[in-house]
Amino acid sequence: MPAEVTTEARIDWQAFQDAAPEVVTAMRAIGAAVHHSGLERDLLELVKLRASQLNGCAFCLQFHLNDARKLGVRGEKLDLLAAWRDAGIYSERESAALAWTECVTLQNQHHVDDQAFAEVSRHFSEREITFLTIAIGHINFWNRVAAPFRFTPPIPRSAA
C-alpha cells in the first residue's frame, strides 16, 4: 500500500528563521545584490518561477507568482512559463535567460555546455550573466529548503 501523502509543514518558515537567522540574513543579502544588479525585475521573477517549477517548490512558486503579479508581468507569460519554448510570447532575452535557468538548475542531468553559454552570452553581458547565474543559484537554494520542509505557500488573501 502506498504511503500517505501529506502537505503539512515539516518545519515552518518562522521556525526556520529562528533556527538559522544568520543563513536568512546572508540569503537576503544575496537577494538584495541580485535585485540591485540592474537585471530586469520581471525577468528575474520569470527565472525564479521556472527554476521553482523544475524543482517542484510550491512555496517559491506561489511567492514569486505573487511578486510577478505585483510587478505587472503579463498573465500569459505566467500561465505559459512551463511551455515557454513553444509559447512564442517571450523575448529573445527572456528565452535565453529561461534556457540558462534550465541548464543551471538541471546541471546534474545535463552538462552546462559551451553552446548554452554562447547563447546566453548573445543576450547578456558578462556582469549580467554573473548575476543571472547567482539569481538561479539563489532560488535553487530556497527551493531546496522550502520544498523539503514544506513551507506553506503564501496564498494572497483575495484568493483564499
Image (cartoon, grey):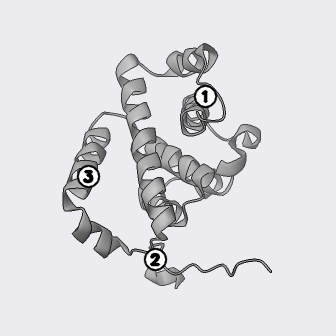
What label does residue 28 carry, if any? 3
Query: For numbered disc 3, what is the local secondary structure?
Result: helix
- Left or right position of 20 against 157: left
* Marks 1 and 3, the one that precedes in the sequence: 3
* Marks 1 and 2, the one that precedes in the sequence: 1
What amino acid is at disc 2?
Pro
Q: CA distance from mark 2 to mark 3?
A: 22 Å
Does residue 104 lie above or below 84 as drawn?
Answer: above
Q: Nearer the viewer, residue 133 or 82?
A: 133
Q: Position of residue 23 (x, y in %)?
A: 25, 54
Q: Position of residue 50 (x, y in %)?
A: 58, 48
- Left or right position of 134 against 85: left
Query: For numbered disc 1, what is the local secondary structure?
Result: helix
Question: Which residue in the structure is indicated by mark 2?
Answer: 156
Q: Nearer the viewer, residue 16 or 63?
A: 16
- Residue contact at pointers 2 and 3, CB within 8 angstroms: no
Q: Residues within 10 Å of mark 2 (few under 14, many from 20)?
A: few
Q: CA distance from mark 1 to mark 2?
A: 31 Å
What label does residue 92 carry, if any? 1
**Residue name at image x 31 percent, y 68 percent:** 16
Does residue 46 lie above or below 126 as drawn?
Answer: below
Residue placed furthest toward the bottom = 160
Q: Residues within 10 Å of mark 3 (few under 14, many from 20)?
A: few
What amino acid is at disc 1?
Glu
**Residue name at image x 25 percent, y 57 percent:** 24
